[in-house]
Image (tube, rainbow, N blue to C red):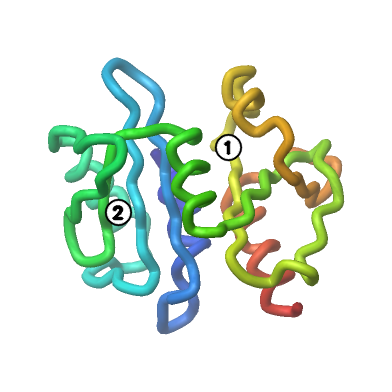
């Protein structure tokens, strides 16, 4: 849980504000039962403080609810929604909205952020490498390496924000 919470914090919060040009979709795919997606919408989010307890409380609250259908996000609180689905569903949703999917991988390619400054969806795993099944879903997508070392997700997010802010 702490890995996910740090990712949300790094992606959305800046000093005294929220990045309203950023969205985070967490894929909760471990354990029993169907997969769940949690969407933190930076354009609408409210009532969440930039501390791990606050964010974790939102995720725990959502996990107590029944999972909505894969193709429908249901609002939990202001700017926080949840739905069923997995990475393939998110990739399908992004395709419909014109979002360019790029996955972060230490062995990834050299996707050029400067050529695509808007509407990029970054995919990164938690503290484990992508599974064989996830890798199959990501095959053929652009990839980006931030170095040879396996970095923590929240660090990758901070680096990506820096690179995008500089372009």
> Where in the figure is residue 88, as x and y percent of width and height?
49, 33
Q: Which residue is mark 1?
A: 125
Image quarter for residue 151? top right
Hey, which residue is sitting farthest left in the picture? 65
- Mark 1 crowd level (few <14, some 14–19, many ≥20, 10 Å Cα): some
* Between discs 1 and 2, the one toward the N terminus: 2
The quadrant in which the N terminus is found is: top left
Q: Is residue 126 left or right of residue 80?
A: right
Q: Secondary structure at mark 2?
A: helix
Q: Check the image and report above or below for 91 versus 158.
A: above
Q: Is residue 133 left or right of residue 114?
A: left
Q: Check the image and report above or below for 57 versus 36.
A: below
Q: In the image, what residue occupies the spot 75% across and 78% down? A: 167
Hey, which residue is sitting farthest bottom in the picture? 16
Image quarter for residue 27? top left
- Mark 2 crowd level (few <14, some 14–19, many ≥20, 10 Å Cα): few
Q: In the image, what residue occupies the spot 66% across and 54% down? A: 156
Q: In the image, what residue occupies the spot 64% across and 68% down? A: 161
Q: Is residue 78 left or right of residue 111?
A: left
> Where in the figure is residue 163, as x and y percent of width and height?
73, 69
Q: Secondary structure at mark 1?
A: loop
Q: Nearer the viewer's eye, disc 1 or disc 2?
A: 1
Q: Which residue is mark 2?
A: 53
> Where in the figure is residue 109, as x and y percent of width and height?
84, 45
């Amino acid at each position: 849980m702490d890995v996910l919470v740090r990712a949300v914090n790094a992606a959305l919060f800046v000093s005294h504000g929220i990045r309203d040009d950023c969205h985070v979709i967490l894929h909760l795919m471990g354990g029993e039962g169907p997969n769940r997606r949690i969407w933190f919408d930076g354009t609408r989010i409210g009532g969440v403080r930039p501390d791990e307890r606050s964010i974790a409380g939102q995720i725990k609250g959502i996990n107590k609810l029944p999972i909505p259908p894969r193709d429908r996000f249901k609002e939990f609180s202001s700017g926080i929604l949840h739905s069923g689905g997995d990475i393939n569903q998110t990739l399908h949703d992004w395709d419909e909205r014109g979002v360019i999917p790029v996955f972060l991988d230490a062995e990834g390619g050299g996707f050029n952020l400067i050529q695509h400054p808007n509407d990029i969806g970054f995919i990164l795993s938690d503290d484990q490498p992508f599974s064989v099944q996830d890798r199959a879903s990501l095959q053929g997508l652009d990839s980006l390496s931030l170095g040879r070392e396996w970095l923590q997700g929240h660090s990758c997010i901070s680096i990506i924000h820096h690179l995008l802010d500089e372009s």
